Amino acid sequence: MQMKGAKALITGGASGLGEATARRFAAAGADVTLLDIPQSNGIEVAEQIGGRFVAADVAVTAEVAAAVAAAAEAMGGIHLCLNAAGIASAHRIIARSGELFPIELYERVLKVNLIGTFDVLRHAAQHMAENTPTDDGERGVIVNVASIAATEGQIGQAAYSASKGGVMAMTLPLARDLASYGIRVNTIAPGIMETPMIAGMSDEVRESLSHVHAFPKRLGRPEEFAALVQHLFENTLINGETVRLDAAARMGPR
Ligand SMILES: NC(=O)c1ccc[n+]([C@@H]2O[C@H](COP(=O)([O-])OP(=O)(O)OC[C@H]3O[C@@H](n4cnc5c(N)ncnc54)[C@H](O)[C@@H]3O)[C@@H](O)[C@H]2O)c1
């Protein structure tokens, strides 16, 4: 699909990877709606890029339904749905203190990262199905965000890895399911990217994570992620795929 005039819904669009993609799409002439939590910087980012903001917690289905409908109505449809809303978590199953992994934390991570992604994309797909197809029969593109932790989760990442593994695993069935509507579904599995999510970790953890990349030996830039989203949006033949964006990283146990 073409960037100019595209109608893009970006969850997690107020920060990090979602924000960088929102900026790239807006600069290329797309109409952009950011979906993020009310306490995010969504309004400010939307103002800066000439887009709009809808507030929702992707883990609350009534909020998702209302926010996606509002975005589709404001833009007159949806061509791109990028699911970049997500949360990180780190907890050992049995912590050194003896505390067990809190089951509420496990449920929350699955609810936001996996179920929230599915909920947003199913509502977005409903609107995409109403689009007039391109000459190639295309009506929309969905891009989800997993992580290399989907396949190489480290100690403490049981919940996060399960959520991202779920995103990766559902990519092909989603693409098959939506093929008859001309809607493609792909997933990006980033390595370690320079975003507020990583900035919140200690210097020691950040330093150890930056060595995970083989080359280039630095953290990934959000703009590099945004460029890949653009390519997945524009290249009609890529479908049902998970693309690693990780500088040949393979994570060890810690
Ligand atoms: N940064 C990395 O190294 C990295 C690596 C692999 C995967 N990822 C994934 O990329 C995605 C984006 O991460 P990021 O690094 O840009 O993080 P980030 O924290 O900068 O941005 C995440 C955004 O999601 C929003 N969000 C969180 N929970 C939400 C909810 N319940 N409903 C709506 N919005 C919510 C936040 O408010 C924030 O704006 C996440 O899914 C993350 O797991 C990041």
Image (cartoon, rainbow, N blue to C red):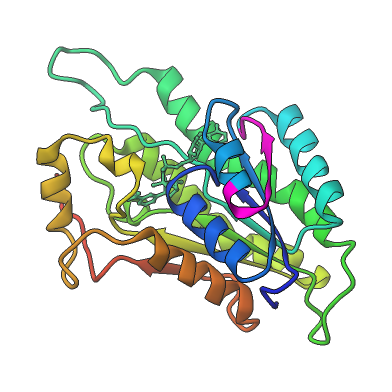
- Looking at the image, which residue is at 17% across and 50% down? 209
Q: Residue 94 or 16: which is nearer the viewer?
A: 16
In the picture, measured across the screen, residue 168 lies left or right of residue 253, that is: right
Percent of width and height locating residue 113: 51, 40
In the picture, measured across the screen, residue 34 lies left or right of residue 114, that is: right
Among the 4 quarters of the image, the one containing residue 143? bottom right
In the picture, measured across the screen, residue 45 lies left or right of residue 220, that is: right
In the picture, measured across the screen, residue 137 lies left or right of residue 158, that is: right
Asked whether residue 11 appears in the rendered view, the answer is no
Asked whether residue 208 appears in the rendered view, the answer is yes
> Which quarter of the image is occupied by the C terminus?
top left
Percent of width and height locating residue 90: 28, 32
Q: Residue 164 or 76: which is nearer the viewer?
A: 76
Which residues fall within the magenta stretch?
Answer: 48-58
Ligand 1 quadrant in view: top left
Q: Residue 69 or 168: which is nearer the viewer?
A: 69
- Looking at the image, which residue is at 30% across and 52% down? 194
- Looking at the image, which residue is at 27% across and 27% down? 91
Above or below, 105 against 215 in this view is above
Above or below, 197 against 133 in this view is above
> Which quarter of the image is occupied by the N terminus?
bottom right
Above or below, 37 against 180 in this view is above
- Looking at the image, which residue is at 48% across and 64% down? 226
